[in-house]
Image (tube, rainbow, N blue to C red):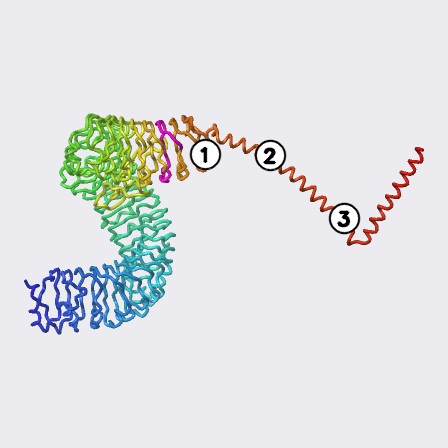
Amino acid sequence: MFSNNLNMLSRLTSLRRLIFLNVDLTKARDWPDRLPSLEHLELNGCQLPVFINSYSSNYLTWFFNQSSLVKLSLSYSGISGRIPSKIWNMTSLSHLDLSFNQLEGELTSSMFSGMTSLSHLDLSNNFLKGELSNSLIRGMPSLTQLNLSYNNFKGGVPSSLFRGLTCLSYLDLSHKKFEGELPGSMKGVCELRALDLSFNHLKGNLSSIFQSLSCANNTLMILYLHMNNFSGLVPDFTIFSSLRELNLSTNKLSGSLPSNFERLSNLVILNLDHNQLTGSVLDLSRFRSLDLLNLQNNQLNGTLHVSLGQLSRLSYLDISSNSLKGEIGVLHLSNLSRLRYLDMSFNSLSFNVGSSWMPSFKLDTIGLAFCRLGPRFPNWLRTQSNYSNLDISYAGIYDTIPFWFWNLSTIPNFISLSHNNLHGNLPAHSLIEHFESNPSIDLSSNLLEGTIPNSFKNSVYLNLSRNAFSGSISFVCNHGFSLNGLDLSHNFFSGKLPDCWSNISNSLTVVDLSSNSLTGKLRRSLDFGDNQFSGTTKWIGRSFPYLVVLSLRNNSFSGKIPPKLCLLSSIQIVDLSANNLSGKIPSCLCNLTAMTQKKSSPKAITDTNATFSTIGSPYEDYISVVLKGFNYEFKNNLELVKSIDLSSNKLEGKISAQVSCLTGLISLNFSRNNLNGSIIPKIGQLNSLKSLDLSNNHLSGEIPATFSDLNFLSTLSLANNNFSGRIPTGTQLQGLNASVFSGNPGLCGNPLPNKCVSDQAKGSSQNKHSLENNEDDITLGLYISIALGIITGFWVVLGILIFKRSWRYAYFCFWVNVYDKLYVIITFRRHTRA
């Protein structure tokens, strides 16, 4: 009970160092009044009494009374609330560690103003918030190590935060959501040895950042800038002569790697993955100390330099998910005796090492998916008998699987030989059946045949789909509770489904037996489409509550769709088409949560020993979905596929109004049933819908005007119903073929040839009205034109005669002469007649 009574420590007046680790001190009663010589107090992992707002408690007062205290470390102690201000009065402290607690509040410059002796400050892994100010740490000129990582700070890194910190050697501001660019004050930090700014939102050109750190080119050993938004080219990082670890992954770096490096480097870790780098992997011979090289997920498109084989200390190599090409020869791999992790997957590389090559390494992880290893099965794998993960899918192998392949000396986690042209039978016995662990095995998309041996009974995930296997599937009963995922689809299995699912249903997450010749009644399943199963579907929603895909298409199921279907909150694809289902569509569809979202993360089987390529990815096999009248198979982006197909059954009643909740749907097919009533008015809420088929039912009423909100609708069929009225205008409906609306005599309007009666009457009225308006317009226009002409002519002539005297005189003379001539002519004619 030493921790209950600490007063005995008072006798140790000369005690300088006191350390309790992982001790429960919550019940401590008597703390020593004072230890005048105590310099080092460490209570890491101890459970302390109430720390905050209890300044009068004995133990807290005792902390503050230790005027000689130089180091105070209280990490992992469950401390919560704000940091007591009295801690900042302990001016003798040079080392303060409050990390991994639950501290809250903001940091201010006044807290640190008197701590001139403090050299080590660690407040990481708390809940501190707010923005950092320029003057935050100016009161600590002796600071050498600062760790503020894993908090809730925001904003940018202050422009002059580090001004005057000439002794700073360790700085960690990672995991804090900082934004903007790095301040120019970093240029004066010349003693920096380790800088971690990872997992922020920082940006800027990488060359400029390297320039700002150039003052530390002889001291900097660790530089972590990953998970940010830095851009630009990758500069020559050998200018930092002491650099050992460089992580620039997951940024926006572009261009090629430097063609020439300035000097030899002692770099041990180089991580540039998940950027946009291009070009070849050039000469790396200057990095003889390199232990880890990660270039995965870039756009590298050249060849791999043979200098790779000179990196004799390399243990981890990942160049996967690029566009590298060319051959991998013995020179690339000859001296890599320490190599344990190799991933060259998802490139266009071809292994040319010869059948007698014996590699010097013993790999734990082998990732060579999409690398050409064939046509013969790679014989050098015989030397790699203790690996835990192997992926040689899509490797162009045209061969049988040698018997030695299955005689492994260690317990594998993952084996994938999928998408090759492997043929022959699986071995009846192998060492796999004796392993106590449960490997994941993927042999899908090959030409393998025969029956399935019991040697695979311990596999936790088994994918044998798209082969030529035959016989019974009774072997699944030997798996017991170990089986999580099973895919036997697209084979020639036959016979009745074994009645042992109750033994494995608690662990089974994925099962696909579709496209075989299986028969019998079904109780618990997932994708059993295109077989001859019968029975009811009452088990739906109970047996597999986390189901993502439910496909029972083209079987002989009968009865009603159970309301417990709505318990499947993670379901994304429901295909019950081409059965004998009857009754009504369930009225609880709003509970299908995954379908109410535009995008979701499907719950599926995941390898917990995730390492590379397909390992650790959610279960992905070809999911068959009928969209737009065609049968599509999806393997990727399943989170975007939301579909319901209940077509070709005997369903009746109205369409449930809760369909409008399923705003994530891209395809909805209720065709070939006995549904009646009208289309739900809120159909426009399904604005992700690309395909809608309600044809061959007894639906009636008008087509809702909300169809105008279906902006992505490209395939529609409402044929052979009893719809009436006008087809809504102002949508893409007028651009569809008329056959979409055929078999509905009451429909009218574009794109149908028959116009609506109201349109015709309205058209005649409009034509007559238009003609009358035209005649009125012509008559009125004529009168106005004449009047304007008269008025204009009169005033033009009269105005000239009034203001122009010479014109007025000539005008009147003209008419006098005309009068005289007329008078003479008339008088002459009268005399002649007489």
Q: Nearer the viewer, mark 2 or mark 1?
A: 2
Q: Secondary structure at mark 1?
A: helix
What residue would you read off at disc 2?
A: 772
Report helix, strand or loop for mark 3. helix
Q: Quadrant of residue 725?
A: top left
Q: Amino acid at mark 1?
A: Gly
- The residue under the point 35% across, 45% down is 323
Q: Which mark is residue 797?
A: 3
* Mark 3 nearby-residue class (10 Å; few <14, some 14–19, many ≥20): few
Rendered image quadrant of residue 108: bottom left
Q: Which mark is residue 735?
A: 1
CA gap between label 2 and label 3 equals 38 Å
Q: CA distance from mark 1 to mark 3?
A: 63 Å
Q: CA distance from mark 2 to mark 1?
A: 35 Å
Q: What's drawn in magenta, residue-wise?
A: 682-702
Q: Earlier in the sequence, mark 1 or mark 3?
A: 1
Is the residue marked by circle 1 packed among few (<14), some (14-19), or many (20+) residues within 10 Å? few
Let me know if residue 695 is in the magenta part: yes
Location of residue 809 with respect to 696 vertically, above or below? below
Instruction: State which quadrant residue 26 falls in.
Output: bottom left
Residue 724 in the image: x percent, y percent? 41, 29
| Residue 614 inside the magenta-drawn segment | no
Q: Position of residue 220 (x, y in %)?
A: 29, 63
Residue type at tag 3: Val
In front here: 575 or 749? Answer: 749
Q: Nearer the viewer, residue 73 or 738?
A: 738
Q: Residue at x 23, y 63 (%)?
A: 123
The residue lying at 28 percent from left, 39 percent from top is: 590
Point out the image quarter for the C terminus.
top right
Q: Position of residue 295 (x, y in %)?
A: 31, 50
Does label 2 or label 3 sit earlier along the sequence? 2
